[in-house]
Image (spheres, rainbow, N blue to C red):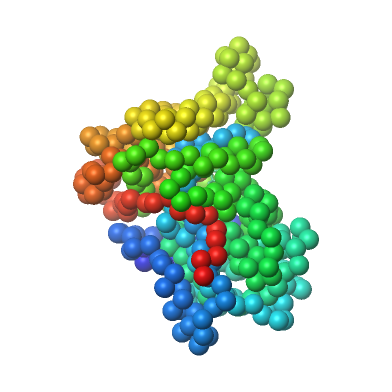
Amino acid sequence: MIEWRMIERGIEDRVGMIYDSWLLILPYFFQLSTICQPAMPLEKQDILSHFTGRFGQSPRFVIRAPGRVNLIGEHTDYNDGFVLPLAIDRAVWIALRPREDRRVVVHSIDYQQSGEFSLDHLQNEKSGWIEYIKGTAWALADAGFQLTGWEGVMQGDVPLGAGLSSSAALEMATARAFAAAGDLAWNAAAMAKLGQRAENRWVGVNCGIMDQLISAAGQADHALLIDCRSLDTQPVPFPAGVAVVVLDTSTRRGLVDSAYNERRSQCEAAAKFFGVTALRDVTIEQFRKSADGLDAVTRRRALHVITENDRTLQAAEAMRSGDAVALGQLMQQSHVSLRDDYEVSSDALNTMVECASAYHACYGARMTGAGFGGCAMALIRAEAADDFVRCTSAAYQEKTGHVPAVYVCRATNGAEVVG
Ligand code: GLA
């Protein structure tokens, strides 16, 4: 990665969740100290040459699975609600060839480390990045897929811990690799659910479905409106002349898992109070009528989720009608709601959003992902994007002393075999 060529670890969206081993977090801190300006996105040629360098021949398959940025619909996925993410041009790549002996042997270019395991003895050894691959193998096998072993190399450029879903990208790249090696049918929603299961049950992170589903099902040049209850996905085109800019605050969150789980419990309590399965089922009118019976904190949490679902549907409409101004305003409102009602923002994120919003050609900006650190994102008039990157980086650095990584990103396809 930045040196961002240092793949995933479970650091991902929720630092502190599974960091029971210092060995696992050391590469993360190393990486943080190197954050500055991102390299160009990885390309197929990069992973191809690593494979041929190692195996002396071309791979049978090259897989790419992207990270994501969420335009709007934050902390709604585990409430059966709506989200509007895009798959981005930062991804995990795997080049592989099948093996006969049911072993999986992977070399991580980023960690300069190899890992391997047998599909006949899947055991969780909490041993870092390889557990994401093993966990995904476990979820696929448990769902009845006949898996074939493979060997290959892996490389990624989704920044770690930035809220851009590096873990989900690794899980979906792995699922795609098994599908290619064993000629398995690829159903994006089903595979996303298995990736989520690996993350929940093997890695131990209680995430929703958004990250895996956008990484599996993303569409180039579009965001996806996802109904997290039905898993229905609808591609939504970007208004003409806008650019999506990722604004990495270069701060990373701590203890986010407990805060995330606490938010989930508060949402469940609120849904119970309203007598529904999930907050998705509560309208703003119902909320206004009876929310007084909730304690103040739970009420604010529920208010965020209910209004955010509504904003997300409106945002998809705004995109469809090419209305970047309306979309930007909804993003701005989302940020305020996350900051004040859901309370998952941070000083760095708020400052970044203020710096971005102050720029004349910015339609809107907000924190993205789980929160507490990591990235914000902004929607910009495309022709001003380069100047925006310069001005916002400088303004943020001056205010906080942190050196941010700010870059324009492109909406890409979800997990696919690219060669
Ligand atoms: C993390 C989780 C997602 C989602 C977001 C918040 O990224 O992995 O499932 O809950 O936080 O929108």
Write the residue at 48% across / 69% down. 155
Q: Of residues 238 and 165, which is closer to you in this image?
A: 238
Q: Of residues 174 and 202, which is closer to you in this image?
A: 174
In the depicted structure, whether residue 30 falls above or below residue 232? below
- Quadrant of res 32: bottom left
Q: Is residue 293 visible?
A: yes
Measured as percent of width and height from the top left, residue 245 is found at: 34, 46
Measured as percent of width and height from the top left, residue 166 is found at: 50, 57
Q: Is residue 164 visible?
A: no
Q: Is residue 97 left or right of residue 402?
A: right
Q: Is residue 42 left or right of residue 297?
A: left
Measured as percent of width and height from the top left, residue 228 is found at: 62, 39
Measured as percent of width and height from the top left, residue 75 is found at: 54, 37
- Quadrant of res 340: top left
| Image quadrant occupied by the N terminus | bottom left
Write the residue at 52% across / 50% down. 218
Q: Is residue 296 left or right of residue 143?
A: left
Residue furthest bottom as drawn: 56
Q: Is residue 228 left or right of residue 34?
A: right
The image quadrant in which ligand 1 is located: top right
Write the residue at 51% across / 81% down. 58
